[in-house]
Amino acid sequence: MFETVVPTAMHALTRQSLLSFAMIGFVSVCHGQGGNPPDAESLPGLLARAEKGDVAAECALGKMYAYALNVPQDFAEAARWYRKAAERGYADAENGLGFLYENGQGVPLDRVEAARWYRKAADQGNADAEFNLASLYDTGQGMPLDHAEAARWYRRAAEHGDSDAAFDLGVMYEEGQGVARDYAEAARWYRITANRGLAVAQTALAGLYANGRGVPRDPAEALRWYRKAAELRYAPALYELGSAFAGGRSVPKDNVEALMWMDLAAFRARGLLQEKCAAERDALSRRMTPEQVAAAERRALAWKKKWAP
């Protein structure tokens, strides 16, 4: 029998998306803890360097305590070490301290203070901080809501290589929020991050091809991008593939293949999208023979085994 499992975590985004295929509420996500985890180094070695005023070591200690890397997690200690480096202008530490203030970890929750530290790091070209500052402008937390300013900082982060910022900038162009609506520009930013393997961007780009917005209408190209995202387990793309095979859109109608993709969508989705996928899966299965349903179950099970940790 088909089963439905809701994953414990889905891809999180920073803004509400109006992409027509999805019925998901995305939540804000920060780029925090001062960048990537520090390279392996002994705690005594880092402490020795930090006591001599090495700001990189101070920031690395902050990361170790924030990430619980070879030490018990201790956000207050993370904040103490981040602050030492941040007060001397070290951008990664400024961003890390801002993250702690935004989330109330080791310090009181204070998004105004978070924005202050993010801005210090962003002014130095720190892409994580640029993204985080954009997110605060985008949601009106710690500062007045300002989509135009959000777009400006997303653009800076995207130009510094941040994939999430590139996607969010694409969404702003698609929605016409903070910038003039420009589907071609939306497609450009989606493509940049889709080519880096971000499933939600691949799905967004597929939607533009499906509707001929900003790119020539090309159902086959849309299907290609949906499949890329589906292979990354992204539920809206799995749903789109199921719908395509069920309706014979750009592919020969194939109920067995449709049922397989729709079951995988229900398996991966949550909330309203999960309910929709499960309902369409069950409705489709009632129109099929037991042999067809069994074949779809076998195909779906093969994917689930492939995805198992």
Image: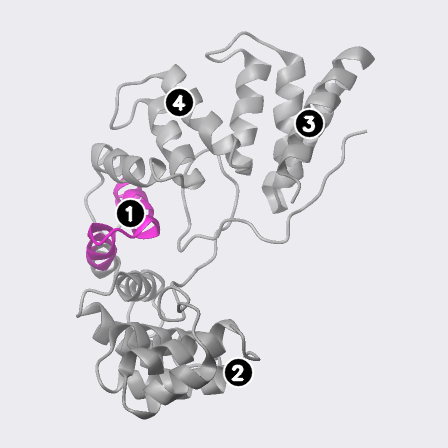
Q: Give the alpha-carbon distance from disc 3 to disc 2, as whole Å.
A: 42 Å
Q: Is residue 132 visible?
A: yes
Q: Nearer the viewer, mark 1 or mark 3?
A: 3
Residue ID for mark 2: 74
Q: Which numbered tag is attached to residue 166?
A: 1
Q: Residues within 10 Å of mark 4 (few under 14, many from 20)?
A: many
Residue ID for mark 4: 222
Q: Give the alpha-carbon distance from disc 2 to disc 1, as whole Å.
A: 33 Å
In primary-sequence order, the first of circles 1 and 3 is 1
The quadrant in which the N terminus is found is: top right
Q: Give the alpha-carbon distance from disc 1 to disc 3, as whole Å.
A: 34 Å
Q: Mark 2 and 1 residues: CB-CB less than 8 Å, in contact?
A: no
Q: Mark 4 and 3 residues: CB-CB less than 8 Å, in contact?
A: no
What element does badge 2 sit on?
loop
| Relative horizontal placement of residue 233, taking residue 31 as reference (left or right) | right
Point 53% across, 23% down: residue: 241
Q: Residues within 10 Å of mark 3 (few under 14, many from 20)?
A: few
Residue ID for mark 3: 302
Q: As shown in the figure, which amino acid type bears the numbered disc 3?
A: Ala
Question: How far from the left and from the top, in percent, is residue 107?
Answer: 45, 86
Q: As shown in the figure, which amino acid type bears the numbered disc 1?
A: Ala
What is the span of residues highlighted in magenta in the rendered image?
A: 152-176
Q: Mark 3 and 2 residues: CB-CB less than 8 Å, in contact?
A: no
Q: Give the alpha-carbon distance from disc 2 to disc 4, as whole Å.
A: 46 Å
Q: Residue furthest top?
A: 252
Point 26% across, 24% down: residue: 215
Q: Residues within 10 Å of mark 2 (few under 14, many from 20)?
A: some
Q: As shown in the figure, which amino acid type bears the numbered disc 2?
A: Asp
Identify the image quadrant of residue 115. Answer: bottom left
What element does badge 4 sit on?
helix
In primary-sequence order, the first of circles 4 and 1 is 1
Q: Give the alpha-carbon distance from disc 4 to disc 3, as whole Å.
A: 25 Å
